[in-house]
Amino acid sequence: MAAKRKATNGTNGVLEAAMASLARTVEETRRTMEESRREMAENQRRTDEKTAESRREMAESRREMAESQRRTDEKMAENQRRTDEKMAESQRRTDEKMAESRRQTDERIARADERIARAEEAAAARSAEFNDRHNELRRHSDEMFFELSKSIARIEKRLERIDHIEAVLDEHTRVLERLPEVIRQQIGFGRPAQP
């Protein structure tokens, strides 16, 4: 009887050590899962910040383009107004002094044409610059969305790993729940069979 008690105490010690080891494993697994969740939340926050920054940059670029276009339109309108005024003055002088006025009018028209040509060239250069900037922003946006897609894929893989870990934990829990009864049966203290 004493030998049986000693064997039972030894089995209980092994059982307690096994249960303690399993409990530590479960706790470590839970800590790992919690850390993984925190990392996923941080990655999502950084991705959201990058996306918001990209959108702000695109909105700022659009505002700059609109402002530059407005200024260009104002300058062209002012140039046109001045040209029209000079042409009207030239015509008046032509009526008064036919020969001299015609020469002066031709010179003024030529100068006005040069200014308009320069303004058009400047507008074309600005338009090309705006197009380049827009294309660069679009490329940057495409890269950001590609990185976002990769981040989402990594998050989905981590979620799959978490699901697997949770399934393993559930299985460990079921094993722990059955373990006392299995041990009782192995040492001869099992519950009597139901009639």
Image (cartoon, helix red, strand yellow):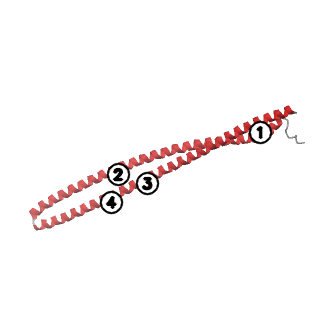
Q: Label 3 vs label 1: CA separation?
A: 59 Å
Q: Which residue is mark 2?
A: 130
x, y percentage for residue 137?
A: 40, 49
Q: How many marks?
A: 4
Marks 4 and 2 close (CB-CB < 8 Å): no
x, y percentage for residue 186?
A: 82, 34
User: Which of the labelled discs sits on residue 29, or is there none?
Assistant: none
- Three-letter code, disc 2: Phe
- Three-letter code, disc 1: Leu
Picture residue at 74% right of the left edge, 39% below the top? 175
- Three-letter code, disc 3: Arg
Q: Is label 3 or label 4 in front? A: 3
Assign the N terminus to one quadrant of the image: top right
Picture residue at 51% right of the left edge, 43% below the top? 150
At mark 4, the secondary structure is helix
Q: Label 4 vs label 2: CA separation?
A: 13 Å
Q: Label 1 vs label 2: CA separation?
A: 72 Å
Neighbour tally class for label 4: few under 14, some 14-19, many 20 plus, Cα within 10 Å: few
At mark 3, the secondary structure is helix
Assign the C terminus to one quadrant of the image: top right
Residue 188 visible? The answer is yes
x, y percentage for residue 48?
A: 50, 50
Q: Label 3 vs label 2: CA separation?
A: 17 Å
N-term-proximal mark, 4 vs 1 = 4
- The extreme front residue here reads 2
Q: Which residue is mark 4?
A: 70
Vertical position of residue 158 compared to residue 100: above or below = above
Q: Which residue is mark 3?
A: 56
Residue 192 quadrant: top right
- Three-letter code, disc 4: Arg
Picture residue at 25% right of the left edge, 55% below the top? 119
Q: Which residue is mark 1?
A: 179
